Amino acid sequence: MRSALISFLLLVTAVSNTMTFAQTPEEFAQAWDDNHVSDKPASDVRHADLKGYLEKLNGMGLKVGLAGLSYGGREIYQVEWGKGPFKVFMWSQMHGDEPTATPALIDMFAFLEKNKDKIAWVGEMHNRLTIRAVPMLNPDGAEVFQRRNLQWIDINRDARDLKTPEGQILKKLVDDFYPDVGFNLHNQQELTTVGSSHNQATISLLAVNGRADGSTYPGFERNKRICSVMAEALARFIPGNIGRYSDAYNGLAFGDNISAWGSPVILIETGGLHGKDESFLIKLNFIAFLSALQAIVDGSAEKAGMELYESLPSNSSGMIYNLIIRNAEIVIPGKSEQASVLSDIGINRERRRAQFIPPVYVRSIGDLSRQKGLEEFDASPYYVVPKEGVMRRGVLASFLFYKKSRVIDFDSEEFEKEAEPDGIYLFGKWVKPLE
Ligand SMILES: [Zn+2]
């Protein structure tokens, strides 16, 4: 009985939250579709593009200030909006190859500025919140699309040491502003999954505790409620693809330390979603940010339950591959008699900018019956010949496919010329698709 009652109360809470939204998540999605400043995949945004975006925001009337310079001498900017007493601080891309939130912040500010005299809650928010954000804290890393800064230091392990100019800037901005809440915005591997499922964790959330002993306190609980609001909003678009990020305490990370210094932090990690491009992920971030901010302003963040957030399954890994070739009879040229083996092949691609073709590697050979591929291919009717002539973990995924009904001398040095393959998979693409 008790659990049924609690479930009912949860439902009522969830419904009443929805009802108090001044704007629905669907309306935020529509607003992003109709109008956004960002104009390219997040991974293709370089420092020069960011400057272009910020000029547009500045032209609209937003305050854009120089926060400092990166180790490589690139400008790090802070944007400010609102004049209220409740202080929100957001920062993106402290890891250079984790870009999704950067254009989402730009689009969020553009939306707020455009609508502050048009939409009641946005006007209310302008009076009650002050939002400061650093889009692209690590512009040098972003420029070369690497996690670390140019000193090869992980800025998110520099919260205590403060050896990086970027870490020093972040610390100073937090100290000067002393925000009520912080949003730490990252990307996680696109093959991160939700709990024991094979679903990609498209968004993972974490209310960052910041205390080594994990004991609770009001700002931490408020952030769990805000996470529930975001999870509920995102579930309209990606049900089953929302995870909870590991809450393991890290005494060197900024999230934990900023929480410990008195500004409880929410971590948002964006993963991937098969079949959707980066613009969809930017839109999800936009929806999550606005849902959270709106809930802070209209009070629904205080009323929301923590349970939805707490019930999110934890992130997992190792359960999915970009591609699994099933039942592959692998033939090594020159050694076709000894080396033929029947197995599954798990293949993953590396993270690259959208404008580059990512390298694609064999990551597992063997029984992958417990795993799923975002794409799968049953190779039963074919011999699978690795183009590199070797088959092991870490080789580039390039294969020739030959129908088993054909008689081919794989030990001939010229076999590829003598017998046209039925299919060719090269560097992650079907160059010659199988029929
Ligand atoms: Zn990160």
Image (cartoon, rainbow, N blue to C red):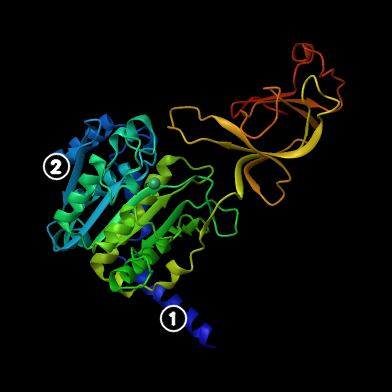
Q: Residue at x 40, y 72 (%)?
A: 306
Bin the neighbour count of mark 2 within 10 Å (Cα to Cα): few under 14, some 14-19, many 20 and up: some
Which residue is situated farthest in the bottom direction here?
1
Mark 1 vs mark 2: which is more N-terminal?
A: 1
Q: Image quadrant for the C terminus?
A: top right
Location of residue 77 in the rendering, given as x and y in whole percent from the top left corner: 20, 41
For residue 12, side relative to residue 303 (left or right): right
Residue 421 showing in the rendered view = yes
Percent across and percent down for residue 205 are: 41, 58
Above-or-below relation of 97 to 246: above
> Which amino acid is tagged 2?
Gly
- Determine whether 54 is above or below 22 in the image: above
- Tell me which residue sits at (77%, 12%) in the image: 413
Location of residue 136 (image quadrant): top left
Name the quadrant containing residue 164. Answer: top left
For residue 339, side relative to residue 195 (left or right): right
Number of residue marks: 2
**Could you tell me which residue is drawn at 34 percent across and 53 percent down?**
252
Amino acid type indicated by mark 1: Leu
Q: Secondary structure at mark 2?
A: strand
Marks 1/2: CA–CA distance: 46 Å
Estimate how packed mark 1 is, as few (under 14), some (14 to 19) or many (20 or more) residues with alpha carbons within 10 Å: few
Q: Is residue 395 left or right of residue 38?
A: right
Write down the residue under mark 2. 65
Q: Which residue is mark 1?
A: 9
* Element on which disc 1 rests: helix
The residue closer to the viewer here, 254 or 144, is: 254
Q: Nearer the viewer, residue 411 or 432?
A: 411
Res 27 seen here: no
For the residues carrying marks 1 and 2, which lies nearer the camera in this image? 2
